[in-house]
Image (cartoon, helix red, strand yellow):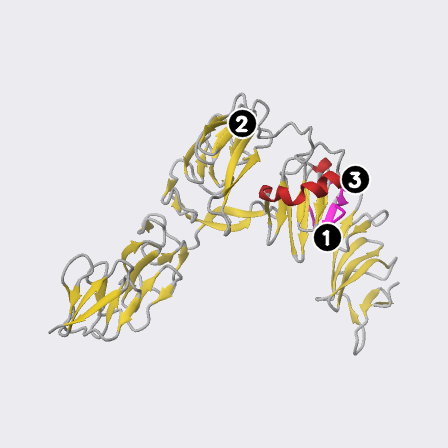
Amino acid sequence: MSSLFVTEADRVLLRQNEGEPVPLKGGITSEGFSVVHIFNRGWLPFGYLRDTQGVWWFDGRKSKVTLVSREAEGFRVLDEDYGLDAKHVYLEDKEIPGADPDTFRLLPGSPYFSVDKRRLYVKNGDRFHTWDDIDPETAVAKMDYCIDKDHVLHLFNSLSYANGSKGELVEWLRESCPDVCGWWHPDYAMTVQGAEHIQGNWYRTSAAVFYLEELGTSNRREPRQVYNLVRGADPATFEVLSGIYGRDSEGIYCTWRKVSAARTQAFEALGGLYGKDSENIFYNGYRVDSADPDSFQCLLPAGYLGLSKDNQHVYHAVFDRTEPPFGHPDYILEPLPGAEPESFEVLSENGSWAVDRDKVYQWGSPARKLDRASFAYLFDQGPESWAADSNGLYNANGKRTVKGIDGRSFRMLNRFWGKDDQAVFCFATGGVQRAADAATFQVTDDKGGAEDAGCYYTIKTDGTIKKTKKK
C-alpha cells in the first residue's frame, strides 16, 4: 500500500504534508484496499485504487474517489491515466465510448497518441479527444505528428490535417516503416500523378479522388499546392456538388473528409460550408443536430462565421467538439444563445454587425455594451467595418471603440468624414482630427474633399490627409 494512504476501520484516509490524515470522499472502503497505480501532476497525486467494490479513480485535488469499474481483477493502467478492464477503456473516471481494450495501445515515438482497431486517441495535457479518420494498422507517431498510409496529422491546440508536411517526414518514414505501403512507399497506389481536373479544387485518377489545398507561406509568392486524398471516394461515380462538397455512390465528402450520417442521394450543397439532406443540416461536414431543414436559412453563405437561422434558433460557428463527449474539435454550427430568430438580421456583407430585436452582435457574438435602440450600422470599407450608437463610434476590425467621439451627437457625413459637436473624425485614417474645427467642418465632394473655417482637406490616394490653409 502506498504511504499516501492509511486504512482505519472501514475508511481510507489520505496522508497530508501537515496535519492529520483526511478521509477520502466518495465511498471507497478499507476492505480489500490496494493501490493500482499512483502518479503526480505537479505536487498533487492522482491514480487508480482498488477495494472489494471495484476500481476507483482518485483525484488528489479534491481528495475524492469515483468508482470506475466493478472488474477489479485484470484491471490495468497505460500512460498513467488510461484504465482498461475486460470490456472498456477509461480516461481517469470517464469511460471512452467505443474504445476497444483488447487492441488499445500507445503509439511509440510520441506522448500524445494511442490507437485501437477503430480510431485514434489524442491526449495533450488536460485536453483529450478521439479521431476517426485514421488507418489504425499503419498509424505511427513522431512527437507532434501522427501519420497513416494516406495522411499526416499534426497536434497543436487540437489535431488537424497536415499533408503539406509530408516532405519533412518522408525520409524518416522510409527508414522506420519501409514495409508499410503508405504514401512514402514507391508502390503506393493512391498518388496524384496523372490526375485530371474535375472542377474547382477536385481532381481524380483512375484509382482515387483528391482535393486541392492551397497553402500560403510568408516566403513564397505563389501558394503551395497540396493534393489531399479523399479517402474511400470512388473516382468512377464521384461528382462535384460545390466548392467543398462532393458525392460518390456510397457517401458525401466535405473537402477530403467523409461526412457521417448524410443521406447520399438526398444531399445538396447550400453554398459555402452549408449542406442539407432530407432530414438534416450540415456545416463544415458536421451535422447540426438542432436545425430544421425546412425553415433553415443561410444568412451569410460564404462566411466562416456561420450566421444562419431556422424558425427556432439563430446559429453561429464555434470551434468546439464535433461530438460529445470526446469528439475532436473543429468549426461546427451551434445555436447563438439568446438570439431571436424572427428579427435577427445580418447588416454587413462580412457578418461583422448583426442585430435582433434586443441586441447587437459583432462577429457572431453579442456586443453587450452596445445600445440596440440607438445602434446604426454605417458601412464597410475593405477590412474596416463601422457602426455607432449613442455611446460611441465602433470599428469591428479589432473590435475597437474610437476614443474622443461623443456618440450622442456623432453623425456620418460621408464615407470619408464624420463629426460630433466637438470633434471631426476621418474614416480613411481611422482617427480624430484634433486640429479641425467641428463647428464649421463640412464635406465639399464625395471623393474625400472637406473644409472648415481655416483649411481645405483632401484624402490622398495613399489614404492620408492633405491639409491646406485657406488664404
Task: Look at the numbered disc 1 and give the secondary structure of its residue.
Answer: loop
Identify the mark at residue 111; answer none if there is no mark. Answer: 1
Pointer 2 residue: 195
Name the one closer to the observer, 106 or 196.
Answer: 196
Q: Can you say which quadrant of the picture contains the N terminus? A: bottom right
Q: Main secondary structure of the magenta part?
A: loop
State whether residue 448 is above or below residue 143: below
Mark 3 and mark 1 in contact? Answer it, CB < 8 Å: no
Front tag of 3 and 2: 2
- Amino acid type at image mark 3: Asp
Q: Position of residue 277 (x, y in %)?
A: 46, 32
Front tag of 3 and 1: 1
Q: Residues within 10 Å of mark 2 (few under 14, many from 20)?
A: some
Residue at 40% over, 46% down: 303
Q: Residues within 10 Å of mark 1 (few under 14, many from 20)?
A: some
State whether residue 234 is above or below residue 446: above
- Amino acid type at image mark 1: Pro
Whether residue 32 is visible here, answered yes or no, is yes
The region drawn magenta spans 89-109
N-terminal of the pair, mark 3 or mark 2, is 3
Residue at 71% over, 48% down: 142
Residue at 43% over, 52% down: 336
Quarter of the image for residue 174 reads: top right
Name the one closer to the observer, 65 or 417.
Answer: 417
Pointer 3 residue: 102
Quarter of the image for residue 443 reads: bottom left
Is 100 contained in the magenta span? yes
Q: Position of residue 346 (x, y in %)?
A: 33, 50
- Amino acid type at image mark 2: Ala
Q: Position of residue 456 (x, y in %)?
A: 16, 68
Q: CA distance from mark 3 to mark 2?
A: 41 Å
N-terminal of the pair, mark 2 or mark 1, is 1
